[in-house]
Amino acid sequence: MVRGRDSDSDASHRTDRRTALRSVGGGLAALGLGLATGGTASAQEGFPPSERTRWGNAVTVGDGDARAFLTRGRSGAPRFLGVWLSEDALTGLPEEGEHVRHSVPLPDGAATVGNVEWLTADWNPHGHGPEDVYDVPHFDFHFYFDPQERVERRIPPGECDADGDGEADRPVPCDVYERATEPLPDAQRPPGYVPTDDVVPAMGNHWVKRDAPELQGEQFTHTYIYGSFDGRISFLEPMITRQFLENLQGKVVSEVPTPRRFPTRGFYPTEYAIRRVREEDAVAVYLRRFQRFRGTQSVF
């Protein structure tokens, strides 16, 4: 959910996300815990199914690596789309400094089948605001509906002195902020989600679920966020703490409240899952239970 240093780019991608989110405070909300199911190595054999799965190139994360994968069903529709983290990717991560963005190359078909054009695994050593909610070490996994170049061009870093006191209030230009906070049409509003008006460079606005457990005093472990820009949903974002990934046994599946329509017609997830694959010494974070949705507007 935060913005900082891209492992594949220069320092121009840096920004202070803690300051940006702190302004949202307790008004943030997000989807909470889902169904937890036990698992054994034998039960997880064949995940993901090799004959129907395509892989992207690996990128270094911590002492290990991350790879994107796309699994299709027999009909050709997407079944799973996500990130595969080797166990040692959870070690050797920066413990100080800014957020680090890792762009994870997508496999062939992710854009045409799953509507995802860019995927990142973002490491936050100290988390981000609001305090006592998301300020713990965690990963943000962004599934963007637009290519990286387009996102960065349309939502650049900058400053906006909204109240005219001579100090920047927002980390993007004022006109970009206005575009990012344009309301979603009713058909694209996920049930129970509200806009934070927390606009971040190379992201946009963030929408969170009003009754999230972690915002009702429970400990944050994992959650799900929608992003928007120019009045359209622009990304999907599971956020997961490192501690949860390290301690997970089996898998956790969470339902995702979905809008009636997405920006363009196609397949979109109705659940996300976090799964330990013991025999591979890995953890998978992925979208699943894809359903076909109608679109509300043409592609930009």
Image (spheres, rainbow, N blue to C red):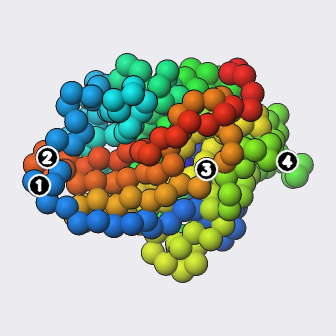
The residue under label 4 is 162
Nearer the observer: mark 4 or 2; the answer is: 2
Instruction: Residue 40: name its quadrant.
Output: bottom left
Secondary structure category for the residue under label 1: loop
Q: Residue 45 carries which label?
A: 2
> What amino acid is found at the position of numbered circle 2 in the picture?
Glu
Which is more foreground, mark 3 or mark 4? 3
* Picture quadrant where residue 209 is located: bottom right
Q: Are marks 3 and 2 in contact (CB under 8 Å)?
A: no
Query: What number is the disc on residue 41?
Result: 1
What is the CA distance from the residue labelled 3 to the residue labelled 1? 32 Å
At 24% across and 39% down in the image, what residue appears? Answer: 48
Residue 83 in view (yes/no): yes
Q: Quadrant of residue 253?
A: bottom left
**Quadrant where the C terminus lies?**
top right
**Sequence order check, earlier mark of 1 and 4:** 1
Report, in whole angstroms, how far the alpha carbon at label 1 lies from the one at label 4. 54 Å
**1 and 4 marks in contact (CB < 8 Å):** no
Under mark 1, the amino acid is: Ala
Residue that appears at 88% across and 52% down: 163
Label 1 and label 2: CA atoms lie apart by 6 Å
Q: Earlier in the sequence, mark 4 or mark 2?
A: 2
| Residue 137, x across and y down, in percent | 39, 60
Give the foreground label among 1 and 4: 1
